[in-house]
Image (cartoon, helix red, strand yellow):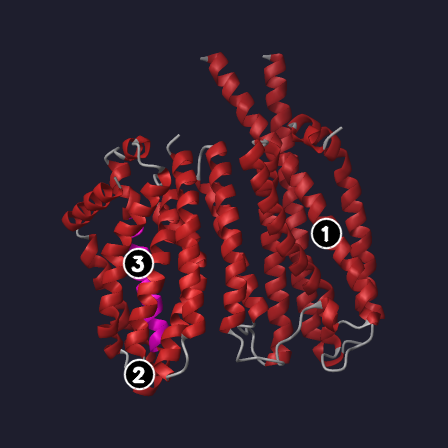
Amino acid sequence: MIAVLVRDLRLAVRAGGGFGLGLAFFLIVVVLVPFGIGPDTDTLRPVAPGILWVAALLAALLSLDRIFALDHEDGSLPLIATAPLPGEGLALAKALAHWLTTGLPLSLAAPVLGVLLNLAPGGYLWLFVSLIAGTPALSVIGTFGAALTVGLRRGGLLMSLLVLPLYVPTLIFGAEVTRRGAEGAAVATPLMLLVAITLLSLAALPFATAAVLRVNLR
Amino acid sequence: MSIWEYANPKKFTETFGRWVPWVYGIAALCLGTGLIWGFFFTPEAENFGSTVKIIYVHVPSAFVAINAWIMMVVTSLVWLIRRHHVSALAARAAAPVGMTMTIIALATGAIWGQPMWGTWWEWDPRLTSFLILFLFYIGYIALWAAIPDPDTAADLTSILCIVGSVFAVLSRYAVLFWNQGLHQGASLSMDARENVADVYWLPLVISMAGFVALFVALVLQRTITEIRVRRIAALSARLHRAEA
Amino acid sequence: MLGQYATVVLSAWGVSLAALALLVGLSFARARRVKAQLDAIERQRDGG
């Protein structure tokens, strides 16, 4: 049942083109940064981990309102919600679809963009690992935020306001893993905490999301 | 006689409406005593000089800012479980008060920091956590405002409040981790119990009592206002149906 | 009495008290306005 849904979503996104937009946004933001803070390698290198993480986070944020928007627009959301699939399963499926089309590609693209910001050699692996570990949290938190604002006019802006503070712990630990990797220091502690947050989000938020969907579809 | 009697909006308004002026009175008394005592009759501190007197507004506002959110979590849970509208409205009423307290805590913290740290803002773990709390307050209030149906709004904001609390706690520890290595020892300790000597303690406690009483008065008053708003909406709807 | 930190302490207190006064003032104003509205609509219901 979940598999059917995920496949369904993958197809929808491929046709709609939200997939490429997230990556393009990621690229643009990373390119913009040196124009803002100067091209000096010594300026860029220390901030590269943080910039890459923030840019990836914003790119993930961008595609969140699509999670329920298409279904809401064509009226299929209530139908999907009343299907035998439990709300929590729906929430996880939506989050997974979002991650596969946003978080995963961003994680793969990030090391390439790291070159543009002169990321130190040790950082590339840990940038990738931290994004792979952290972006699922971004997707599942984002799904919760998208459910809260589904159907609201200009809900996207409100959703960003609600979701971004929830992203702070993941961002802090993800960037820290990357930074420590770049410096050659031990990454175990922040990495474990990052993974813990992701697992906690995956375990708890689908229930909250399902509750929110039930409220919104009353 | 159980506390749940007051879940009835009419009873709540009748009972607590009479309390409001008294609680405001208590707040004024405590605030007046604590603040005047603290401002005029306590000495300057060794390393802070006269800026130590900022604790009388900074610490109580921070205390209320956090406890307001905790109260909102409790009333949100009561709403979700027992569906008492008064509870949901109390949470809505408390949010702007908590948010204002957070702003006061941030502003006084920053102003205090200027002579101490040399900058208007430091990403000190405590101040940063309050900044994040401020963002949560804004989001909560914005969500209430964005949703037309009151019951839906009550449900969604309650869930947001609870989820937000989990992440607020996570953020607290993440921020501590994030800022550990940078300002050890040099950070301004805002913890009254740790750092405040006896001579400051009593006026501080009285000020805190004043701030708490003010919070209670404001929330009671604002909850009654929200109950009345709800009643106006119900009566208007009924009148329109009668006309039609 | 406040010495060199006079502006600092006074602005901190000033901001705090101003914010509290604003909050209390707005709460009272709204309470008054809503009560008036409620009274009006209850009169309408009872009278009309």
The answer to whether residue B135 is seen in the rendering is no
| Kind of residue at disc 2 | Ala
Of labels 2 and 1, the one closer to you: 2
To the question of a shared chain for discs 3 and 1, the answer is no
**Residue drawn at (57%, 67%), measured in percent from left and top?**
B127
From what the image shows, is residue B50 above or below residue B172? below
How packed mark 1 is, by other alpha carbons closer than 10 Å (few <14, some 14-19, many 20 or more), is many
**Chain where mark 3 sits:** A
Answer with the quarter of the image where residue A20 lies. Answer: bottom left
Segment tinted magenta in the rendering: A48-65
How far apart marks 2 and 1 lie (CA) works out to 51 Å
Q: Which numbered disc covers residue B212?
A: 1
Give the quarter of the figure containing the C terminus of chain A.
top left
Q: Which residue is mark 3?
A: A60
| Kind of residue at disc 3 | Ala
Which residue is at the front of the view, A188 or B160? Answer: A188
To the question of a shared chain for discs 2 and 1, the answer is no
The answer to whether residue B130 is seen in the rendering is yes
Q: Which residue is mark 2?
A: A120
From what the image shows, is residue A71 above or below residue C44? below
How far apart marks 3 and 2 lie (CA) works out to 24 Å
SS at mark 3 in the image: helix
Answer with the quarter of the image where residue A135 lies. Answer: bottom left
Of labels 3 and 1, the one closer to you: 3
Q: Is residue B79 magenta?
A: no
